[in-house]
Image: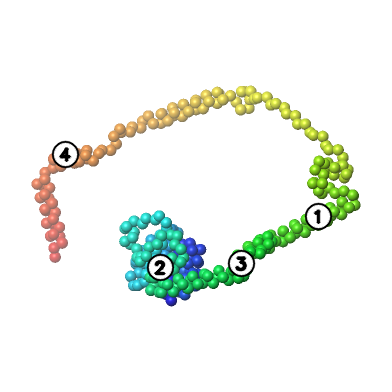
Amino acid sequence: MSKVLLVYEDYADLMNVEATLKRVGFDVLGVSSEYSLADQMLGFNPEVVVGSGRGGKVTTLGVGKRLKEMTRWQGKSILIFPANAKPAPQDLLKIRVDMILEAPVPVMRLVQVIARLSGQDEGAIMDRLNKMSLDTQGKNNQTGGGVSRTTPEEEAIFVKGNSEEADAAEHVEEDSERRRVEFRFGERMNAADSEKSGFSLTSEEAFPDVDLSALERELTGGGTPEPEKIETFVEEEPLSPSGAEGNPQEELAKAEAGLKAKMARYAEMTKDVKVAPKSTITRVEARRRQKALVADWDTENLNKLDELRRDFTKALFKK
């Protein structure tokens, strides 16, 4: 079978596609980083490369650009872009791609495209995949008998998961079993007490119009209920303006006087500083001044001096 290299950002999609391709006979290798693509291409040498990612360690455009740099590789490439993604034409010219798909792509459709690009019998592979799915459904129906016969206690059991989930499920079952035992034990104790005393205090439905809590306090010698405590509230007198917080008008006057003093000190410090109103000149003004300077130059004399410098340099470096 053909070799397929999967470069996916989503680990769940990677495992799903890899398992499906292996079921129909493909030799599959999955990676979750495009930076190791060159090493995997050299060691695995796949016939088809599938790239899918939106950022992080894998991007669809990044996979296409890295594949275009591998000029000696003669396989096919499938790139899966996110939904509603519109790559620029300049980016499409920099990638190597044989088939462009839009996410989300069904696994059956992806298997069909891979089989077509790798030159395999597309119909036979799809028939095999459909047959495997039907066999799996038939086995599930046989094991379940077609009818769900699980009890509420059995539904709380985890069918799959790691050891931590299984331990949590066991703790839930133990707690429920302990509560059921305590409830049954409490019922038996209440029944025994009712047989001794001649009446039961556990059922509220038997005495709907009787305050069972008050009756229980009288029987147990709890005495009369305590009288209610009456709370008294004392109105607080408002603070006078001359209290601990001070007069706001006086604080405002002090702050204004301090601000005026700071402004006076700043004006005293900056009175000798002179800032030119126009510290720079414009480009037009600079050109005008340059032309005014050049107009006073003796151009003939300057040209003669330049010619003499060139002759001196030539004579200096002459062999």
The local secondary structure at tag 2 comes to: helix
How far apart in space, not on screen, are marks 3 and 2 (Cα)?
35 Å
Q: Amino acid at mark 1?
A: Gly
The local secondary structure at tag 1 comes to: helix
Q: Residues within 10 Å of mark 4 (few under 14, many from 20)?
A: few
The color scheme shown is rainbow
Identify which residue, 102 or 131, lies in the foreground.
131
How far apart in space, not on screen, are marks 1 and 3 (Cα)?
41 Å
Task: Kindly check if marks 3 and 2 are in contact, taking CB atoms under 8 A apart as contact.
Answer: no
Q: Earlier in the sequence, mark 1 or mark 3?
A: 3
Q: What residue is pinned by disc 3?
A: 146
The local secondary structure at tag 3 comes to: loop
Q: Nearer the viewer, mark 1 or mark 2?
A: 2
Identify which residue, 147 or 180, lies in the foreground.
147
Residue 247 spot, x, y in % from top left: 58, 24
Q: Earlier in the sequence, mark 3 or mark 2?
A: 2
Q: Earlier in the sequence, mark 2 or mark 4?
A: 2
Q: What residue is pinned by disc 2?
A: 113
